[in-house]
Amino acid sequence: MKQRLHHILYTCIVVVTLWAAPTDVRAQFDAHFNHYWTLQGYYHPAAVGLTENQLAFYGAYSMQLLGFKHAPRTMLFGVDMPFTLLKRQHAVGVSFFNEGIGLFRNQLIRGQYAYRMKLGRGRLGIGLQAGALQVSFDPTGINLGDETDDEAFPATTQKGAAVDVGVGVHYMQARWYAALSAQHLTAPRLSLGENSHLKVNPIIYLTGGYNIPTRRPLLSIQTMAQLQSDFTHTRLDVTGRLLYTYRSNTFGGGLTYSPSTSLTIDLAATIRHITVGYAYEWYTSKIGVANGSHELVMRYTVDLSLFKKSRALHKSVRIL
């Protein structure tokens, strides 16, 4: 909750300070998605192409802090796939991120690459990503009263862009996985107008999960956690989910707790190659249950063997 309110307050503070005097303003750029286990590629470049022999399309849309004017609206879309080259396992992906927060719009388009190898009883992935980050500011929503010609505020939309780079590692075995990544390593500095600048802080992500089988073969327990920090703001999410699997279909739901921030309930279903998930995040402050956040996530996979002459079947690892 503190991070989401930070985004709203950030809008107000930047409007006042960014153009009141020449200055550099630091900001945390990334959005938080409740289905972080489904959208691993957003946080970890080494997690692209995890589904063997499958082309994966994924997307998410989030409406946060309902009832608040200029509250964040976030969209993510991406595609990734594994491939073999020179008898080595690789994966590539591309994603587009767009978020509107008040008078600001943050956008990021990036390409991702991962190299995979066997290590012990699992697979190790080493990933790299690079892209272009853009922040724009639309001043038409500023109400200056009678001071419409105040030179301290811009009269037209201001945009700034910079190169963005990230790296990470991902390790997965049959029942568990762990991933570590560092985003915005170049600490992008964007110019908004002649005298104002916005600097995006580097941020690290640490994610892990473990699947616990039960005495009932159709039921399993999924435990996960994610830590994110830019060394100024830190968030921890701890998740527990119950999965029911019948043939190629999986249905699940669970709870995520973020200390001092929120409690989230999620539901998801995978029917053959299509996954659909929904989450509602309730902030544990006095903001109210009705002013939480809605999130919808979708994932669709296509068997790459359909594009080949040989249509041999391959076992795939599904992540709900």
Image (tube, helix red, strand yellow):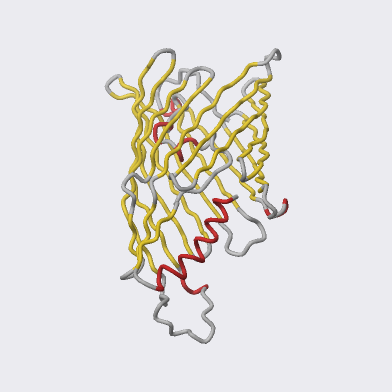
255 in relation to 286, above or below: above
The single residue placed furthest to the bottom in the displayed view is 146
**Looking at the picture, how far across and down is residue 95, in whole percent?**
43, 44
Please identify the quarter of the rendering in which residue 154 is found: bottom left
Question: Residue at 37% across / 30% down in the picture?
Answer: 91
Q: Quadrant of the C terminus?
A: top right
Question: Residue at 48% across / 18% down in the picture?
Answer: 173
Closer to the camera in the image, 55 or 152: 152
**Looking at the picture, how far across and down is residue 278, in whole percent?**
64, 41
**Looking at the picture, how far across and down is residue 123, in whole percent?**
41, 20
Closer to the camera in the image, 241 or 1: 1
Please identify the quarter of the rendering in which residue 115 is found: top left
Q: How many marks?
A: 0
311 in relation to 33, above or below: above
Question: Residue at 50% across / 48% down in the picture?
Answer: 31
**Looking at the picture, how far across and down is residue 197, in whole percent?**
35, 63
Closer to the camera in the image, 240 or 233: 233
59 in relation to 159, above or below: above
The single residue placed furthest to the left in the displayed view is 86
Please give left or right for residue 36 compared with residue 167 in the image: right
